[in-house]
Amino acid sequence: MITAIVMISCEVDRIPEVAEAIADIPAVSEVYSVTGDADLIAMVRVKAHEEFADVIADRLNKVEGIVGTSTHIAFRTYSSHDLEAAFSLGLDGD
């Protein structure tokens, strides 16, 4: 699975509707309303790089109310589970 993090700027009065429309796109796993430079962040997960064009350019970017996006493709994923395994010393937690 390949993950892209999409930073989305949208019309402020349409944030909830834009978020819901993006969340309805099949390859979108989560949509977050955030503070900072972006209004929303969407996590897009696909099996092949070529699918990003279908999902992001052809569907996500065409949602009414979006004024701009910035896409970041993840090289590697780290989760708390992965980090626990990496730093585990093999000792039983007593």
Image (tube, grey):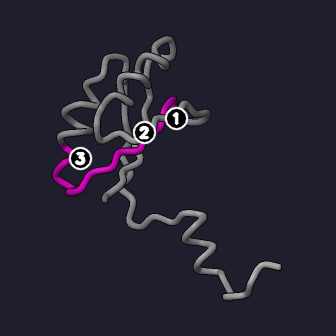
Q: Nearer the viewer, residue 26 or 49?
A: 26
* Residue 35: quarter of image: top right
Task: Report the span colored magenta.
Answer: 39-53
Residue 87: % across, % down = 65, 81
46 falls in the magenta region: yes
Q: Earlier in the sequence, mark 2 or mark 3?
A: 2
The residue at which mark 3 appears reads as 52
Question: Does label 1 or label 3 sit earlier along the sequence?
Answer: 1
Badge 3 marks a residue whose secondary structure is helix
- Residue type of the residue flagged with mark 3: Phe
Disc 1 target residue: 32
Looking at the image, the residue that sits furthest to the bottom is 90
Q: Earlier in the sequence, mark 2 or mark 1?
A: 1
Determine which residue is flagged by label 2.
Answer: 42
Above or below residue 11? Residue 36 is: below
Question: Where's the N terminus, which quadrant?
Answer: bottom left
Q: Secondary structure at mark 2?
A: strand
> Which residue sits at x=37%, y=17%?
65
Q: Residues within 10 Å of mark 3 (few under 14, many from 20)?
A: many
